């Protein structure tokens, strides 16, 4: 069993980004990322702080707009419009989830596709499905980057993804398909989940349920990517996989924390540089 170490790879990526930032600055360009944070959800605040610190490490200007949870949809759309029109802002992301009175899809569609560093705009999503160069959602992008770093050949592999969200599951399936893997996308209505997981050469799981994947659900030598983040009562952070037992059967596995999480942040920074360069 070998650990897929997202933390060390993310540090390498950040080092490269730092060099790219310095190069852009010699041309008078200072990459900047604007994050809109609505409300006071503790997890969202934590994520935004992590993103801001990562920007700081790499020399990217970080702008955080903190808005009250009672903000109207119209006012939020106006905030995004202003950032779209600001030439000094290269990347925009809206931290999810948003309050229930706001239409998330409407908000994400408002972000300029060229500044959509989260890769959630339908225009960017469509480009992924066509296999075209685009701003790609950070978590799926980070997962593919991590697997390639360890020289894992994806061609023809049976990939099972548990969780069919627009943020992770669907774009991740598209990226694996673009790498010529064979995809099974499972979700809450999937019957006989174990039947699918036992067929997986690569198993990716991200639904937010502790110990969803147990040792008997994984075949010998499988590669397991744990995307889940769960906080136990003790304060410990764990994924969706029973790591101690499942890891005994795997050839590669991501830890939680230290696996997919750091790669998500690194990929977001890569997208910010890509948006700054306008190479989309």
Image: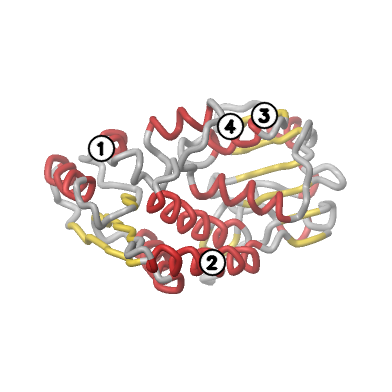
In contact (CB < 8 Å): disc 2 and disc 3: no
Which SS class for mark 2? helix
Q: Secondary structure at mark 3?
A: strand
Q: What residue is disc 2 on? A: 14
- Neighbour tally class for label 1: few under 14, some 14-19, many 20 plus, Cα within 10 Å: some
The residue pinned by badge 1 equals 110
Q: Position of residue 140 (x, y in %)?
A: 56, 45
Residue at numbered disc 4: 174
Residue located 34% across and 46% down the image: 115
Q: Position of residue 10 (x, y in %)?
A: 59, 64
Cα separation, mark 3 vs mark 1, equals 31 Å
- Real-space Cα separation, disc 2 to disc 4, in angstroms: 26 Å
Q: How is the image coloured?
A: secondary structure
- Name the residue nearer the viewer: 128 or 163: 128
3D distance between C-alphas at marks 3 and 4: 11 Å
Q: CA distance from mark 4 to mark 1?
A: 23 Å
Q: Is residue 224 above or below residue 52?
A: above
Q: Earlier in the sequence, mark 2 or mark 1?
A: 2
> Which circle's residue, 2 or 3, is located before the other in the chain?
2
Judging depth in this view, the residue of 80 and 72 nearest the camera is 80
Residue drawn at 35 percent across, 49 percent down: 96
Query: Callout 4: few (<14), some (14-19), or many (20+) C-alpha neighbours within 10 Å?
Result: many
Give the x, y percent position of residue 53.
41, 71
Q: Which residue is mark 3?
A: 184
Discs 2/4, front: 2
Q: Secondary structure at mark 4?
A: helix
Q: Nearer the viewer, mark 2 or mark 3?
A: 2
Q: Residues within 10 Å of mark 3 (few under 14, many from 20)?
A: some
Is residue 166 left or right of 226 when viewed as pictured? left
């Amino acid at each position: 069993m070998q650990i897929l170490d997202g933390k060390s790879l993310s540090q390498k990526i950040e080092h490269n980004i730092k060099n790219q930032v310095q190069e852009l600055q010699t041309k008078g360009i200072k990459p900047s990322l604007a994050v809109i944070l609505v409300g006071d959800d503790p997890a969202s605040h934590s994520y935004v702080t992590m993103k801001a610190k990562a920007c700081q490490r790499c020399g990217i200007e970080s702008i955080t707009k903190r808005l009250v949870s009672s903000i109207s949809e119209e006012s939020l759309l106006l905030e995004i419009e202003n950032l779209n029109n600001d030439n000094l802002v290269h990347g925009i992301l809206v931290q999810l989830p948003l309050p229930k009175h706001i239409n998330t899809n409407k908000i994400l569609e408002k972000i300029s596709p060229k500044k959509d560093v989260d890769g959630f705009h339908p225009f960017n999503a469509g480009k992924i499905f066509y296999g075209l160069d685009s701003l790609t959602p950070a978590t799926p992008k980070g997962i593919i980057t991590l697997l390639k770093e360890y020289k894992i050949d994806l061609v023809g592999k049976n990939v099972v993804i548990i969780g069919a969200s627009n943020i992770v599951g669907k774009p991740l399936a598209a990226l694996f398909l673009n790498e010529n893997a064979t995809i099974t996308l499972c979700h809450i209505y999937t019957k006989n989940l174990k039947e699918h997981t036992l067929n997986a050469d690569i198993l990716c799981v991200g639904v937010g349920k502790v110990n969803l994947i147990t040792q008997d659900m994984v075949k010998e030598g499988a590669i397991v990517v744990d995307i889940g983040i769960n906080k136990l009562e003790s304060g410990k952070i764990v994924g969706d996989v029973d790591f101690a037992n499942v890891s005994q059967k795997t050839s590669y596995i991501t830890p939680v924390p230290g696996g997919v999480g750091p790669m998500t942040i690194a990929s977001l920074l890569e997208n910010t540089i890509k948006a700054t360069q306008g190479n989309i």
